[in-house]
Amino acid sequence: MLTIDQALGSDTIWCQQQWIEHHYLHSKIDPRCRPIAYVVRVDGERRGALGFGRPESTRCNGWYGSVDDVKAGRARLTRWEIINLARVWLDPRIQPGGSEEIHNAATQAIGQALKRVVVDYLIVHPPCFLEEPYALRECISYCDSSTHRGVLYRAANFRLMRTNERGLQTYMRPLRGLQPHEYRQIHRASDHDERARYHRARRMQPTLFAA
């Protein structure tokens, strides 16, 4: 049976090691993207690692950008409503032809993770300003078309949104909405988060004008 768990402690280190050793980028997710990870388990054994984080690009014209971009009609969503599926790695043993092959293992793992990440991510990295859009509405992921064909993304119900001049494709999948109790969990996390409290306090400080 395939399940996922949010990576904590030694599991986080294990996920990073798998991406460095086996993922085609051979690197962990940049900490500036504020990542979280999930361990893919089969009958309790670690068999994969998924990683999410904020997109490195903070603006994509007509799609996402700042709160002001949305207000001005330059973007449909704020960048805070976007999450990036940045790493997918599965042990060859559970992939097609492997000794523990699981049918559609990757799409199963991604599907489970997308149901959870809308809450898990915002509890680990709570929003600072609850009056602004923060609920995760779309997940994106990038595909280098020079080496990959995007088969996994299409199988996992992602849609190709754009291809840049370097052949880098951006795929997108809508995310589920939050339930009332999940909003309450996120609000509590924000109330107690040191970073969120710091930024709220800074915004509330009156602007000082020189005499």
Image (spheres, helix red, strand yellow):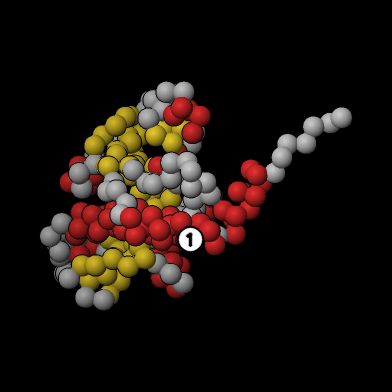
Q: Which residue is mark 1?
A: 189
The single residue placed furthest to the bottom in the displayed view is 44
Residue 47: quadrant of the picture? bottom left
**Depth check: 89 or 183 in front?**
183
Residue 151: quadrant of the picture? top left
The picture places residue 145, in percent across and down from the top left corner, at 30, 36
Please identify the quadrant where the N terminus is shown.
Answer: bottom left
Q: Which residue: 32% across, 68% down? A: 5
Q: Which residue: 35% across, 62% down? A: 38
Q: Amino acid at mark 1?
A: Ala
**Depth check: 186 or 8 in front?**
186
On screen, 125 above or below 83? below
Instruction: Answer left or right for 144 relative to 126.
Output: left
The picture places residue 122, in percent across and down from the top left corner, at 43, 55
Q: Which residue: 33% across, 36% down? A: 170
Please identify the quadrant where the C terminus is shown.
Answer: top right
**Depth check: 38 or 115 in front?**
115
On screen, 99 above or below 87? below
The picture places residue 159, in percent across and down from the top left corner, at 24, 37
Q: Is residue 199 visible?
A: yes
The picture places residue 137, in percent across and down from the top left corner, at 34, 43
Q: Is residue 50 visible?
A: no
Disc 1 residue crowd, few under 14, some 14–19, many 20+, Cα 10 Å: some
Q: SS at mark 1?
A: helix
The total number of labels drawn is 1
Q: Which residue: 20% across, 54% down? A: 107
Instruction: Answer left or right for 117 relative to 122.
Output: left
